[in-house]
Image (spheres, helix red, strand yellow):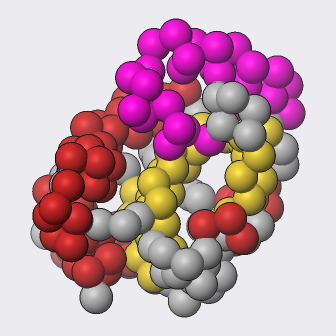
């Protein structure tokens, strides 16, 4: 029983360390491309409003990343597009999902773009950025500990990380993201 408690405490500490290590820091500069080859630099090009980023750098993390697409689309993208006269009740948030390619796998970014253009809904496509480059910088700055899970960050209008989470979508995680953006 004592061993189980120590293991649980260690796991909770590790998760809490990830979540709090980045909060308060400015998001490191990242330049990525849309499917139409438009360059976007975060946080410079996203300043002025909140930004929600989902980052993944392995094929195995894709499944968990995909669990976020529909809820984020429904909450932050579709709701804003459909708001009409109710626009004051929606979120004005930049939303980007960023698959990251490094080293030998960087060549796969072009293939991933073509696949996205063919298979991803047109409304979601502008919200996908493709990063090619050195992932080590981001692993260190953002505390990526497991390559098989996606990482999510909420940046304030100045580019500062105000919330971080990782893994598969849950309502609890989405509620935390919303609370940060609403404040």
The residue lying at 40 percent from left, 39 percent from top is: 65
Taking the magenta stretch, the answer to whether it contains residue 12 is no
For the question of whether residue 16 can be seen, the reply is yes
Residue 68: x and y, percent? 31, 43
Residue 138: x and y, percent? 71, 60
> Which picture quadrant has residue 143?
bottom right
> Which picture quadrant has residue 11?
bottom left
Q: Nearer the viewer, residue 81 or 112?
A: 81
Q: Quadrant of the N terminus?
A: bottom left
Q: Is residue 149 left or right of residue 57?
A: left
> Which picture quadrant has residue 19?
bottom left
- In the displayed structure, would residue 58 be above or below residue 137? above
Q: Quadrant of the C terminus?
A: bottom left
- Prevalent SS, magenta region: helix
For the question of whether residue 168 can be seen, the reply is no
Residue 136: x and y, percent? 78, 55
Q: Is residue 28 left or right of residue 70?
A: right
- In the displayed structure, would residue 29 be above or below residue 64? below
The residue lying at 43 percent from left, 25 percent from top is: 122
Q: Please provide the residue range marked out in magenta.
A: 103-130
Q: Nearer the viewer, residue 130 or 93?
A: 93
The residue lying at 66 percent from left, 37 percent from top is: 34
Residue 57: x and y, percent? 61, 40
Taking the magenta stretch, the answer to whether it contains residue 111 is yes
- In the displayed structure, would residue 73 be above or below residue 88? above
């Amino acid at each position: 029983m004592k061993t189980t408690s120590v293991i649980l405490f260690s796991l909770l500490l590790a998760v809490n360390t990830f979540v709090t290590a980045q909060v308060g820091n400015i998001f490191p500069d990242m330049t990525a491309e849309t499917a139409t080859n438009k360059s976007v630099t975060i946080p410079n090009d996203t300043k002025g409003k909140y930004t929600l980023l989902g980052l993944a750098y392995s094929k195995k993390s894709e499944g968990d990343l995909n669990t976020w697409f529909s809820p984020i689309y429904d909450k932050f993208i579709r709701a804003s597009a459909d708001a009409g006269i109710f626009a004051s009740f929606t979120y004005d948030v930049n939303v980007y999902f960023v698959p990251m390619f490094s080293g030998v796998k960087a060549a796969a970014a072009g293939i991933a773009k073509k696949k996205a253009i063919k298979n991803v809904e047109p409304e979601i496509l502008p919200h996908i950025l493709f990063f090619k480059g050195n992932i080590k910088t981001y692993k260190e700055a953002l505390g990526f500990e497991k390559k098989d899970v996606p990482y999510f960050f909420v940046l304030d209008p100045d580019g500062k990380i105000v919330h971080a989470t990782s893994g598969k979508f849950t309502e609890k995680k989405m509620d935390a993201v919303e609370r940060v953006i609403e404040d």
